[in-house]
Image (cartoon, rainbow, N blue to C red):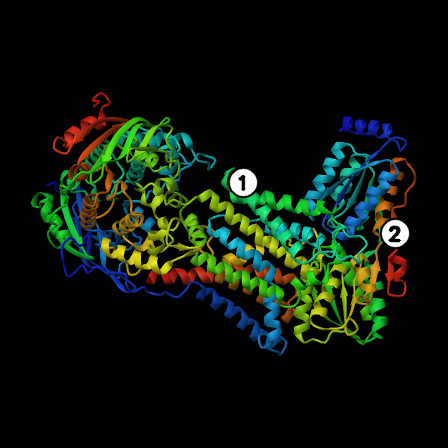
Amino acid sequence: MKRLLLGAAIFTTCTSSAMAATIGASVAWFDDNFLTTMRNAMQAEAEAQGHEIQFLDAQGDIGRQLSQTQSLAAQGVDAIIINPVDTAATQMMTKVAVDNGIPLVYVNRQPEGNDLDNDDVVFVGSDQKRSGTLQMEAIAEQLGGEGNVAIMLGELSSGATHKRTAGVKEVAAEYPDIQIVEEQPADYQRTEAINLMNNWVVGGQQIDAIAANNDEMALGALIAMKQSGISPDDILVGGIDATRDALEAMQRGELAVTVFQDAEGQGGGAVQAAIGMIDGEPVDDINLVPFQLVTPENLDDFLN
Amino acid sequence: MTTTTDKTHEVVTPKARRKKLPTEVSILIVLIGIAVLFEILGWIVRGDSFLMNPQRLLIMILQMSIIGIIAIGVTQIIITGGIDLSSGSVLALTAMVTASLAQSSDYMRAVYPALTDLPWLIPLAAGMLVGALCGLVNGALISFAVIPPFIATLGMMVSARGLARAYTDGQPVSMLTEQFTWIGSGANPVIIFLAVAVLFHIALKHTRYGKYTYAIGANPQAARVSGINVRRHLVLVYTIGGLLAGLAGVVASARAGTGQAGMGLMYELDAIAAAVIGGTSLAGGVGRITGTVIGALILGVMLSGFTFLGVDAYYQDIVKGAIIVAAVITDQYRQRKRNKTA
Amino acid sequence: MTTNNTQRPAADTSPRYLLEVVDARKTFPGVVALDNVQLRIRPGTVHALMGENGAGKSTLMKIIAGIYIPDQGEVRLHGRPLTLNGPLDALEAGIAMIHQELNLMPYMTIAENIWIRREPLNAFGLVDHQRMHEMTSSLFRRLGIDMDPDMEVRHLTVAGRQMIEIAKAVSYESDVLIMDEPTSALTDREVEHLFRIINDLRSQGKGIIYITHKMDEVFEISDDISVFRDGQFIHSAPASELSSDEIIKLMVGREVTQMFPKQEVPIGDVMLSVRNLGLEGVFEDVSFDVRGGEILGIAGLVGSGRTNVAETLFGVTPATAGSIALDGRETVISSPHQAMLRGLALLTEDRKETGLFLGLSVLENMQMAVLRDGYTKGPFVEQHRLDHQCDEMTELLRVKTPSLEERIGNLSGGNQQKVLIGRWLMTKPRILILDEPTRGIDVGAKAEIHKLITKLAGEGVAVIMISSELPEVLGMSDRIMVMHEGRVTGFLDRDEANQVSIMELASSPAASA
């Protein structure tokens, strides 16, 4: 253990930011569109600063992510960036990094425990609950404070699903004339959302707005509505993430609202935080990148 | 038994071909049972009919169309005694390739800016070709490298998913032309699914292709001695399985108007479940397309039923798993009873 | 014969018999499988059960072994009625059955197979392999078996596995042993060994129920014979009081006129000519001619390479040396399909392994070999024509089946074999290779198949017939080729061949022709 620590220490000294540092990153899902944008931003930021970054795909498996963390530590990387699969199960990974004296950045999803109390363990990301709040506030306003809302849930095992939904419900509770009438999962997938929306449409329940946990599901709901001849004016659809497809749907007048989560800001920020710690600069424990509401009024700002 | 003419040993000549009830009947009863259960619960919980809604009946098939197309390919593979775990991933890969050739010229960030606004036939053909190629690799590995189907298709499952991601570095491929998305709009997926089902029902029942498929599943050695080129036939069966996964990828991307590397996750398991619920034996030699279609419908009815009743999302999968197992147990119990009387 | 020398259990009836089946009746939906069946086994005897397939022997055995529960009647052991709720009950009561289909686990050792479920344990509750080895060795010494208890079963021959099954049954110290056609896959020498074991068990006062189709065995080994027909008990008598003809008459309910209806037919030109044929490491230097109308018998012990020669001729395992000529023209056969195109047909040795499509119907089984080269329009199968052909074939071969749609697994062995013969006759072969055409099928069906072979030869077909049953080879062949350890040791003409001359050639490489 001592030798390992010593080795790591020597390694660290040799690779101050003047030289190219190596950053290891474990991402919860390569398949996720938002995380892909974030990943590309991390890559770009690392390259711009002249460092190397290596990505691993945890494929939604917390066990796999832990072993990836261990192997990155054993490999002697200078910093680790983790986009955690499960925000409640980060302690073991934190311990691995701390024991090996490697700086650790959690990105996008904030650990629920006291991980950030450790030195050189920080978080860069956004408050997921806030995205649900922003989404529902805009929907409530467009509904004029009354109507039936259906929530399309993401994967039930994902922390973001719970936080976003909690934000939506919190706002809805402030409006006595707004009811949450349906709440079913479509696993963040467009195809599943088409199926779910179809079933809701034939279910006969009056629905005035859809609050989807992400844009892909919102787009799926819109496809199903289009095929059933339902106008986007009759059922307002809101998403989260402000993906390119979603912004274009808003431009066509279909999507009512989405929330921009700054993938590039988070990814770039995570790499900056990692490099800052490698160089021994002070980095805050929590670095929040704000969400921004996107509606047709400010759409042009995001279409770049 | 009859070297002389003895009255106690009448030779029964099989002139009269006795028609037995098809094996699908028992699984059809399971389907009806589940539907009726939801109907009853529907009146209790929501005070409304589950089945008396033609639109919902269509949706039940519509939402299973893509998995159903895969399931037909998987059924014929399972009949040969094999398995295909790669179909979900192959769907994702073909969806990516197909979508990249179906993008509209309105879109600034097309994957191939020079290849936009192509007629719908090109992405369709490309998707099916990519699927068939994946199937061909599966078949060649199984037939000529003599790798067990489970392993060969597991490898393809991982590789095809990786290829799907690498194709655009994980970026979705969207903004597809209207003429292409028409393939997946309205009831078209249902029409494609049912057309494929009819085609393969006939192929398995009335063609040499079908007869050989069953023969290889029942006894590959006997098939070989009977003059069947077992290896070549297996390559063909897996290639067609891949082709159908490719077709499913085309329909899926047309329906969602996008190609994404995360599409079709776990579809292979739903497809296998549909086949097995429908009476296809994993031991090979037994199975029918009609059964698989009914198996897919059972999954579709469950999906709609849960949404209709508003079953808590957390419990849906538990119940779904239990119903799959119960459906197969019921079917096997009925079949065993029938075999005893035979 | 032997007197009752087992201890008498305290029972009110005097157990003159070790095992009794009284008034047994068993019905399946729609079928009476057994009715009014009686069976009495004396201690220290071998009791042969005879009857055609479907006569009810297997059902009766399954009742005794606890697999079926009879609708009526009872089984008594040592005079006391037995209630059997499963095969384990029977085993514990002292009745062991050696199944026709062997039930061993190939990747476990001999010792593990024998003592499964009864493994000796050491102090830690783990399997004590050394003691298990010793227990197996002492069991083998008792039975005169020379095998390594630690060898994996998959390395054993069929005969070896049979011995293990018997040893396993003996290890239960059972009073009653049921053997269902134990010699069907054994060579004469192995049969001798088996009979020594049986004699030994008999002298220990055990009762052995012995099911067989082979008449010579019955007289060699059994003390008593019971005959069944159509689920009815027909007759029971000491073996010394019955003749072979009488038994056959009792079995089929009539006289079988001719077991080997060999006819003299005009012998034609040489159709198949084989020169120095070899398959590396299996057989070598095999040369023979077969003429149209001729029946060439191939005899030899199991493992002599007979079957391999047949498979090589048919392209299953293409030859590595030598040449094959058809009608005088040299040809290459590298796959079964090529062989079929050249007019060959092969009825394989092992019905289940390489012949039947067990899950499929009689129709599918019969038509499978002709689909590739006929009866099709484009990709479609001309099912109507095929139905018609298969109907005719089942009629010609007198296949007993409720319909062509019946699953072939539900047919008796003889009828399954007829369907397979039908499969090959539909290809209209000019050279027909039959490997053990009558193995495991009953007397009546056997005679019919022999008649059919004769008829085909009469139509000018060249027939090659491999058989382990010497009477069959002798009765049917025009000429006999004998093999030993992958080489031809001689040819015998019909008039000079007898059991002795064949066995001499089959067992010694020295007697080269």
Quickly name the residue at label 2.
A288
Q: Are marks 1 and 2 in contact (CB under 8 Å)?
A: no
| Residue projecting furthest to the bottom | B47
The picture places residue C226, in percent across and down from the top left corner, at 15, 50
Examine the image and state in which quarter residue A242 appears. Answer: bottom right
Query: Which disc is residue B141 wearing?
Result: 1
Examine the image and state in which quarter residue B257 appears. Answer: bottom right
Q: Is residue B242 left or right of residue B227?
A: right
The picture places residue B177, in percent across and down from the top left corner, at 73, 60
Chain letter of the residue beneath label 1 in the structure image? B
Query: Which disc is residue B53 wearing?
Result: none
**Three-letter amino acid code of the residue under disc 2:** Leu
Residue at 79% in and 46% down: A39
Q: Is residue C487 left or right of residue A189?
A: left
Mark 1: secondary structure:
helix
Mark 2: secondary structure:
strand
Residues beneath discs 1 and 2 located on the same chain: no
**Three-letter amino acid code of the residue under disc 1:** Leu
Residue at 65% in and 68% down: B186
Chain letter of the residue beneath label 2 in the structure image? A
* Front position in the image: C334 or B21: C334
Query: Dot 2 surroundings within 10 Å: few (below 14), some, or many (20 or more)?
Result: some
| C445 vs A9: above or below | below
Quadrant location, the N terminus of chain C: top left
- The mark closer to the camera, 1 or 2, is 1
Quadrant location, the C terminus of chain C: top left
* Front position in the image: A87 or A135: A135
